[in-house]
Amino acid sequence: MSKSYKIAVIPGDGTGPEVVNEGLKVLGAVSEKVGFKYETKNYDFGGERYLKTGKTLEDKDIQEMNQYSAIFLGAIGHPDVKPGILETGILLKLRFSLDQYINLRPVRLYNPAFCPLKDKKAEDVDFVVVRENSEGLYKGMGEFQKKGTKDEVAIQISYNTRKGVERCIRYAFDFCRKRNRRKKLTLCGKTNVLTFAWDLWERTFNEVAKEYPDITTDYAHVDATTMWFVKNPEWFDVIVTDNMFGDIITDLGAMVQGGMGIAAGGNINPVGVSMFEPIGGSAPKYTGKNVINPLAAICAVSMLLVEIGEEKAGKMVEDSVIKITQTKLKSLAAGKMGYSTSEVGDLVVKNL
């Protein structure tokens, strides 16, 4: 008897609906080949809904999201909505309310021709960033003092708990072991300046490492990490870091792997509902033109499938993406692929 899943779909803003359509096209095709069933329900969370109703995400919406096997998100971000409203009211609220405390970002080069780094091969760019996704500076804690005066002070707090840090680090060790590539885990931080938060991170990392003697560990400052992403990406296997640093270095990782058009991410609750998305944003200038690259969204579907236990289907999707990236596409950039958005989706289906 085949398994059945419930997937919440949030197409979102800008080009989100276009890339989500292609992801769902591929999901439908691979489900038939592998033999599992699923049902989807669309939700209109995003900029248009906010402009009409003034609402982002309500508690009842969170309760409903908890009933799903996974969430597939297109993009959040609308040019007519002030930055921060949708991000805080939808994205961060989903992550925090559903306790999606891991942000998982694979950085893998499928075609060296699309890598901006000189003389790097596919095997040189193959690492994963495990980002703590529920604490740090993104907790939203802080205050203004004497706001609007010449003596104004703005305080933004990086909030780190032993529980939050440890569960992220343990996930990274377990992921590194399961990945079974180089079995090397790098802690990326700033211990020489951010002495409170990163003292906690470093102590916890070293304590947990004793339970994983098969994993090699090392440490790199975040500024050095960005340098080595460009100079020696082959040094890395799995990297674990906090919310802010993870947000920054994963965008650099996306460029190293060929651009935002191929970069997918997961917001993971290992024992709950996880959410998967292309990380490139809503790209409003390309909306409705059928030129945006849907491969990041399709790779997000691959990650979703692996997380819900359909590893074979997830690998089939990624293998198809690799094949067309290597043999069909002229570029990974919007409007330069040699194919339209929908045609790229068709190519992935054809090559499953």
Image (tube, grey):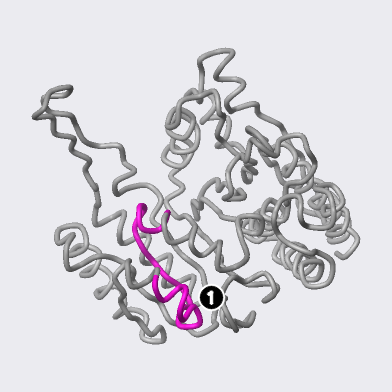
User: Residue 39 in the image: x percent, y percent?
Assistant: 77, 40
The answer to whether any part of residue 1 appears in the image is no
Q: Judge left or right: residue 54 versus residue 135.
A: right
- Give the labeled residue for mark 1: 178
10 or 209: nearer the eye?
10
Q: Which residue appears at 59% of the width and 27% of the height?
A: 45
**Mark 1 crowd level (few <14, some 14–19, many ≥20, 10 Å Cα):** few
Is disc 1 placed on a helix, strand or loop?
helix
Q: Which span of residues is magenta-colored?
A: 227-247
Above or below 318: residue 219 = below
The answer to whether any part of residue 13 appears in the image is yes
Q: Which residue appears at 49% of the width and 70% of the height?
A: 175
Magenta stretch: includes residue 229: yes
Above or below 97: residue 344 = below
User: Residue 9 in the image: x percent, y percent?
Assistant: 68, 37
User: Residue 186 in the image: x percent, y percent?
Assistant: 37, 75
Q: Judge left or right: residue 59 versus residue 142.
A: right
Q: Which residue appears at 17% of the width and 29% of the height?
A: 144
Q: Which residue appears at 78% of the width and 72% of the height?
A: 326
